[in-house]
Each structure stands twice: as C-alpha cells, then as structure tokens.
Amino acid sequence: MDARPDTGRSGEAAAETLYVRKGFRVVARNWRCRIGELDLVLQRGGLLVICEVKTRRGARFGAGFDAVDARKRRKLRTVGEAFLQQARVLPIAVRFDVASVRLRLDGSAVVDLFEDAF
C-alpha cells in the first residue's frame, strides 16, 4: 500500500497548523487547475502566501526543501498566477514559501518553514 498520500496530508496539516498559529487564515487547500496544484494558500492582512509542502518520513531522499527545484518553482509561479486570476484575490503582496516537514516515528512533525523561498 502506498503511504505517500497519508504522508502528504499529515505534512500539510502540520504546516497549516503552524501558519494558523502565526495568524494566517487558510484561503485554499490542495487547489487544483489543469496545470497543477497548490498545497496551501494562506492570507494575513494584505499578504497572500502560496506554500509548497514537502513531507518526508526519513532522510533517504534528502529534506523536503531539496525537491523544490527550478522546474517546480516555475510551475508553482504559473499555477499561482492561475489561482490569482480565478480566485479574484487582490493581495498587496504574494510570497512563495516551502514547508519542509519531517514526520517522526511517534507521529509528530517537525516543520521547517522557508519563507519567501523563491
């Protein structure tokens, strides 16, 4: 059985919890369009944050942040533009973050948040 969907959902929930504690509200989760998906879209005041969440259960494949390469960053920008057009959101600023989440054996999560990652 493939545990990746559960791993991803757990990481997204941990990242979301961190943002909510920082005063953000969730605008969208797993927003999809024909060109891709945004894991989390959050807002605090005039700031809109688009967060890519990468979750790992171990270090075998490196940290989650390492998976957000130049190609992935370009795609996230394009999907982010599509979101802004469809959602008709008019933020003062847009920031792209990466949440690198490591799930521990006990089920707890360690979230390293890279604000303004690209």
Image (tube, grey):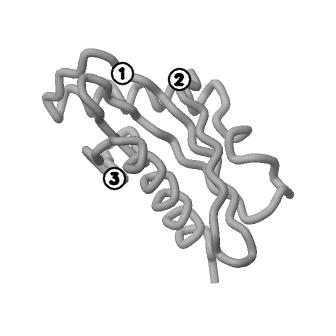
Is 56 left or right of 73, judged from the image as shown?
A: right
Q: Quadrant of residue 94?
A: top left
Q: Which residue is mark 3?
A: 29
The residue wearing badge 1 is 94
Which SS class for mark 3? strand
Q: Determine whether 73 is above or below 101 in the image.
A: above
Residue 11 locus on image (x, y percent): 55, 59
The residue under label 2 is: 116
Q: Quadrant of the C terminus?
A: top right
Q: Residue furthest top?
A: 92
Q: Amino acid at mark 2?
A: Asp
Residue visible at 63% across and 76% down in the picture: 2
Above or below residue 90? Residue 8 is below
Residue kind at label 1, given as amino acid type: Val
Residue drawn where x is 40% and y is 43% of the image: 38
Quarter in which the N terminus is drawn: bottom right
Mark 3 in CB contact with mark 2 (< 8 angstroms): no
Horizontal side of residue 7 vs 28, given as left or right: right
How many C-alpha atoms fall within 10 Å of the one at disc 1: few (<14), some, or many (≥20)? some
Residue 102 vs residue 79, the one in the foreground: 102
